[in-house]
Image (cartoon, rainbow, N blue to C red):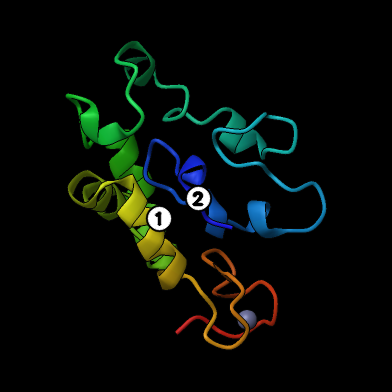
């Protein structure tokens, strides 16, 4: 279930991630404990960003370096590989607010066949396998 607690500082919606959607060793998302996280997410330079911590901000758009090279790099990778933009997400959160963003995400990634969640990494519904449109 997508909720505000699953939205990472970079704008990633952990609720549509393969690691969150899987049954075994489910990742709790960026804000959760490190136990079942992939090493790359534990080491993530955005999540661990000193500037983010220092400023006590929840999202990267509040940073004076926004969008920094790290974020731009991540964003480009996701736009290219998964047709999803973290920076676009952040701009939506900034203009719409987190609650409306989450509402939109639930609709955006809902499977039209079974109501499950479309996994951004697998390009299909995690429940029934229906392809992402
Ligand atoms: Zn489905």
Residue 57 image-quadrant placement:
top left
| Looking at the image, residue 111 lies above or below residue 18 | below
Relative to 66, is 128 on the left or the right?
A: right
Residue in view at x 66 percent, y 41 percent: 28
Lateral position of residue 69 relative to residue 120, left or right: left
| Nearer to us in this view, 77 or 103 | 103
The answer to whether 84 is drawn above or below residue 66 in the figure is: below
Which residue appears at 26% of the width and 54% of the height? 88
User: In the rendered image, which quarter is residue 124 located in?
Assistant: bottom right
The residue carrying mark 1 is 102
Q: Residues within 10 Å of mark 1 (few under 14, many from 20)?
A: many
Q: Which residue is mark 2?
A: 3
Q: Residue at x 56, y 84 (%)?
A: 131
Q: In the rendered image, which quarter is residue 116 located in?
A: bottom right
- Where residue 133 appears, x then y in whole percent? 44, 85
The local crowd at label 2, few if under 14, some if 14 to 19, many if 20 or more residues have their Cα within 10 Å, is some
SS at mark 1 in the image: helix
- Disc 2, disc 1: CB below 8 Å? yes
Q: Position of residue 40 (x, y in %)?
A: 59, 36
Classify the position of ligand 1 by quadrant: top left, top right, bottom left or bottom right: bottom right
Q: Is residue 93 visible?
A: yes
Give the residue at x 59% y 78%.
Answer: 115
Q: Nearer the viewer, residue 79 or 56?
A: 56
Circle 2 — which element?
A: loop
Q: Quadrant of the N terminus?
A: bottom right
Image location (x, y in percent) of residue 45: 45, 27
Mark 2 to mark 1 CA distance (whole Å): 6 Å
Judged left or right of residue 105, residue 87 is left
One can see residue 76 in this view:
no
């Amino acid at each position: 279930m997508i909720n505000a607690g699953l939205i990472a500082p970079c704008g990633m919606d952990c609720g549509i991630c393969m690691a969150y959607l899987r049954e075994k060793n489910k990742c709790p998302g960026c804000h959760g404990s490190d136990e079942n996280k992939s090493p790359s997410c534990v080491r993530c330079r955005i999540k661990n960003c000193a500037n983010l911590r220092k400023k006590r901000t929840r999202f990267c758009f509040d940073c004076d370096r926004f969008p920094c090279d790290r974020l731009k790099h991540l964003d480009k990778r996701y736009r290219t590989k998964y047709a999803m933009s973290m920076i676009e997400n952040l701009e939506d959160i900034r203009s719409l607010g987190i609650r409306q963003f989450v509402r939109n995400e639930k609709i955006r990634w809902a499977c039209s066949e079974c109501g499950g969640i479309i996994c951004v990494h697998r390009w299909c519904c995690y429940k029934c396998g229906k392809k992402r449109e």
